Image (cartoon, rainbow, N blue to C red):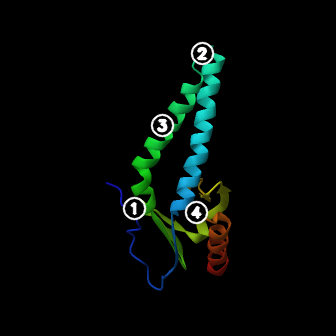
Amino acid sequence: MMTLTPTAELLDGETVQQSFMAERATYLRTNAWLAAGAMAAGMGILWAVGNPYVWTGAVGGLAAVMVRAGYLMSDEMGVRWDLTNQRLLGPGGRMISLSTIDALNKLGSFVQVITKTGDKYLIKYQSDPTATIAAINRHREAHK
């Protein structure tokens, strides 16, 4: 089973500067938007195929997203990323040296971390993803 918090040992001289965890209200808001999209898509598909019960697409889309969100919530709320003065440490043993980060992108409430080798990671459900990116960039500049 994957751990939801960093398990990497800190290196000599390495200290945790900041931690990033999912924010509950952001999780709920993101899933509400996902539900709205699923409802519209379900209704659109049923309308396109000529089904007279288009409204069932909304019910199905809402139910699917609510079940998914409820099932995953406890795991998503337990995920933590630690920013150190040398690396970004994530769940499941993920370790990203600050010098190997090529790009940081905002994807809704997510921060996408792309390394120079093309590996991609998501720091999910951030209440202020721009601030998360700024914090990582501050430490990347200091690490150079």
Q: CA distance from mark 1 to mark 3?
A: 27 Å
Residue 123 in view (yes/no): no
Circle 4 Cα neighbour tier, 10 Å, few/some/many (<14 / 14–19 / ≥20): many
Residue pointed to by mark 1: 4
Q: Amino acid at mark 4?
A: Gln
Q: CA distance from mark 2 to mark 3?
A: 20 Å
Circle 2 Cα neighbour tier, 10 Å, few/some/many (<14 / 14–19 / ≥20): few
Circles 4 and 1 in contact, beta carbons < 8 Å: no
Task: Give whichever of discs 4 and 2 has the lower sequence position.
Answer: 2
Residue pointed to by mark 3: 63
Q: CA distance from mark 4 to mark 2?
A: 40 Å
Q: Is residue 19 above or below residue 12?
A: above
Task: Give whichever of discs 2 and 3 has the lower sequence position.
Answer: 2
Q: Secondary structure at mark 4?
A: loop
Task: Give whichever of discs 3 and 4 has the lower sequence position.
Answer: 3
Q: CA distance from mark 1 to mark 2?
A: 45 Å
Circles 3 and 4 in contact, beta carbons < 8 Å: no
Q: CA distance from mark 4 to mark 1?
A: 16 Å
Q: Secondary structure at mark 2?
A: loop
Q: Residue at x 65, y 67 (%)?
A: 133
Residue pointed to by mark 2: 52
Q: Amino acid at mark 1?
A: Leu
Q: Position of residue 100 (x, y in %)?
A: 59, 65
Q: Position of residue 29 (x, y in %)?
A: 58, 54
Q: CA distance from mark 3 to mark 4?
A: 25 Å
Residue pointed to by mark 4: 126
Q: Nearer the viewer, mark 4 or mark 2?
A: 2
Q: Secondary structure at mark 1?
A: loop
Q: Quadrant of residue 1?
A: bottom left
